[in-house]
Amino acid sequence: MPHHLPARDTDTRQDVGVPLRHGLCAMSRAKGSAVVDISGTDMPVKSAEELMLTIGQNNEDPSSPCVLTTRLQSSDPVLSQSVTHTTLECPIPPRIQYASAARLREYVYVFGGRVRSTNLDSMYGHCCFTLGKRVYMAGGYNVDYLSKCWCYDPGLRGYWIRFGDAPKGFCHATSVVVGDKAHIMGGFGTETMHVTFSARDGWQTEGLLPFCVYGAVAETRGVEVCVYGGTCHEGQVHVYDTERREWRETHNPTHS
């Protein structure tokens, strides 16, 4: 059941629902972090701005795991490069790593994660994404790679629902949603994996990535998926067209 109380440093089995006005973490400068796009017409921001929350340990300021990244959208090439970072308060352990987060309406939900303490019945390095009015959590690591898939529905008194397992266990993969389907890519030991999940069709194999990656950041632009950086993929950007089912490498996904 989500709660809004500060979590204990030694408890990694938390699921915290945080109002966006209270914030969550940053895009760069974070280790083992989760990135959530909170832009949208239902948010109190200008249409010319993109907002990102990154959830994870901040190596530059370990006491501030929550940073809001604002990127200005403009036809002016100079203004379009404007990026600012703002530290926000967030009730999660300051040194948590490999947690997952997903936005559902005006809340961002943070699940699991690794804190240097006892990790009984816990997981980290899992994926988290929103489909419809539910939040899904899949994969991760705890002694071994996990393939379990769970669904959290706030409308059902916060009940968890078990879905079918992924084709194989994975950890530190990247997830992003296009339409009613989540794309899960890469992972430690599964660096070229590309599978999809939907509530209707379950798990499907999309194919192999034309590159190796784990711990990357991804976002959706229309029907395309953009994958940025990550281990084995540093300084690279790849874009996947979900309609043509084709990958391409690019250096400027904003205007591709």
Image: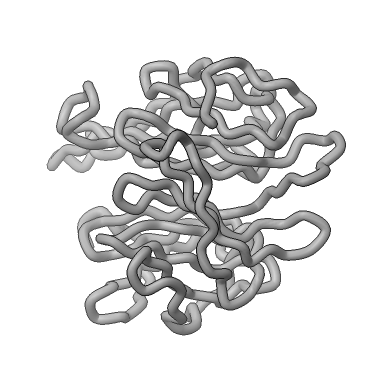
Q: In the rendered view, how is the structure colored?
A: one colour
The residue lying at 48 percent from left, 75 percent from top is 194
Image position of 117 (left or right of 153): right
The answer to whether residue 72 shows anywhere in this view is: yes
In the rendered image, the vertical position of residue 57 relative to residue 137, given as above or below: above
Image position of 35 (left or right of 93): left
Which quadrant, please, contains the C terminus?
Answer: bottom left
Q: Position of residue 91 (x, y in %)?
A: 58, 20
In the rendered image, the vertical position of residue 209 relative to residue 157, given as above or below: below
User: As drawn, which residue projects farthest toward the right?
Assistant: 118
Q: Position of residue 78 (x, y in %)?
A: 24, 37
The residue lying at 77 percent from left, 46 percent from top is 121
Q: Position of residue 82 (x, y in %)?
A: 31, 32
The residue lying at 48 percent from left, 28 percent from top is 17
Which quadrant, please, contains the N terminus?
Answer: top right
The residue lying at 43 percent from left, 61 percent from top is 227
Residue 237 sits in quarter: bottom left
